[in-house]
Image (cartoon, rainbow, N blue to C red):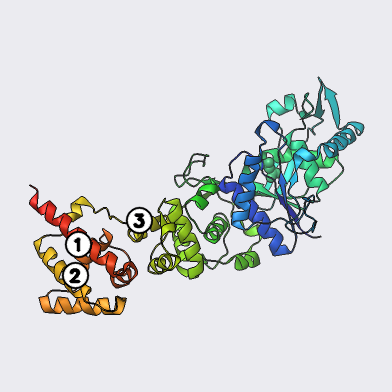
Amino acid sequence: MSVRVRFAPSPTGFLHIGGARTALFNWLYARHTGGTFILRIEDTDAARNTQEAVEVILNGLKWLGVDWDEGPATGDPKGPSKGSVGPYFQSQRGPIYKKRVDELIQKGCAYEHEGAVKFRMTREPIVIRDLIVGEVKRELTDREMAEPDFVIVRSDGQPVFHLVNVIDDLEMGITHVVRGEDHLSNTSKHIALFRAFGVEPPAYAHIPLILNPDGTKMSKRDQGASLTTYEAEGCVPEAVVNYLCLLGWSPKQNREVLSREEIIQLFDLPQILRHNARFDATKLQWLNGEYIRTMSFERFHEFAVQALNRAGLPITRFSTGYIRSALETCAGKIKQFSELADYAGFYFTDELAYDPAAKASLGPDERARLSRLREAFVVLEHFNATSLEAALKEVARKLEVKVGALVHPCRFACTGRTSGPSLYHLLEVLGKERVLQRIDRALALAEEAAQSP
Ligand code: GLU
């Protein structure tokens, strides 16, 4: 029997990383087994059902590279085929639910009650054989015992979550329900509904929750809770996929950096860990850094331009060649794209803002050395890293100072910073004109600061 799984989010305008991970685990399981992955938007709650809220989910999944295989045709003339179908929307499946409710009523498994339809719930304990959690026996609570039947269609005609969730899993031939552990408490109702339809329920796999680093439950407002923020902060999607997989699943052998293909190959449901996973921002950052370090320069360039734009740096007025050369000096040097505006901002500004405290570091000695360096730079015919390095070392030799005694004031004058890309390379990128201008301005400002009391 071929595996059929689904991700069934309700559009709340927010894609929690727990939800993103659920989507990913379902998708991985489908890809691992050669099965089918379905996306089903559970949008029967009309009040919350907006196009924007659906977009948040679709964009998030697209960003993660999670694609679905099936669904109604979207009107693409080439469809139905991958990419031109689905997702399924529960709001478009009303007649299917109606037919199934009639079936339950006819079988005596449901009945009308004060305008609503209620399901005749079994009074017997229900055993859930969960692939992750193990065997769970659910007895009815005292309150449920007093009134075990529950509403499946409200008096306004709206079918409720439990009903449509089960009907769709049944109609769509879902073989494995892989979802967050918060739904474990609903599962006995779902199993009872399946049986009322005369069908054995699918296999269940409830994934433990993602907790905050301190062990508390992750709420909407907690750091890292929304998938959208990862994209906004310039995270690499492969790093997030890799990280989410490690949150609650272990590939064994202590492997941590795994490509999508490797994960697909290794992923299996029984390996999902039973305990709750704690969100670890440092680990995600580390993984992200690993992906940045090893990505192609073209990819780095793409992410970097986005990050600089996001930071509001006016890079478009610079030539593409200049931007490219500037970014070449940053590749492999940053761990997160959010660091880039700070790291490389000096390339894309006309007037550097010098840190006032550090300005004092251009004392009389540094100013004298910097002036000598300027003289050496002015006469340079080829303003490239090799000749700049040679010229600087020559000045250091003549002045009998260490190379660092020139490197630091020069870096500070040209970048306004005490660290950054390789000095000789950044000087080459800035070019002679900018470098001389910056040295002049830094000297003038330091001189001014020295004069004022
Ligand atoms: N719509 C439910 C949710 O977003 C889905 C539950 C399920 O996966 O069965 O939590």
Mark 3 or mark 1, which is nearer to you? 1
Q: Disc 3 marks which amino acid?
A: Asp
Which amino acid, by three-letter code, is at mark 2? Arg
Please name whichever residue, 365 or 91, is drawn nearer the observer in this view of the structure. Answer: 365
Q: Secondary structure at mark 1?
A: helix
Question: For this rendering, which residue is in front, 276 or 160?
Answer: 160
* CA gap, disc 2 and disc 1: 9 Å
Q: Residue 404: percent from the left, percent from the top?
A: 19, 70
Disc 3: which residue: 342
Q: Quadrant of the N terminus?
A: bottom right
- Label 3 CA crowd tier, 10 Å (few <14, some 14–19, many 20+): few
Judge: label 1 CB < 8 Å from ligand 1: no
Which residue is at 77% across, 26% downward? 154
Q: Quadrant of ligand 1?
A: top right
Task: Give amino acid for label 1.
Answer: Asp
Q: Quadrant of residue 13?
A: top right
Q: Which residue is mark 2?
A: 374
Give the vertical position of 12 relative to 281 (above or below). above
Mark 1: few, some, or many residues within 10 Å (few <14, many ≥20)? some
Circle on res. 81: none
Residue 440, numbered circle: 1
Does residue 191 appear anywhere in the picture?
no
Counting from the top left corner in percent of width and height, residue 91 is at 76, 38
Q: Position of residue 39 (x, y in %)?
A: 71, 50
Query: Is the Cβ of the residue at disc 2 closer than 8 Å to that at disc 1?
Result: yes
N-terminal label among 2 and 1: 2
Does residue 96 appear in the picture of this structure?
yes
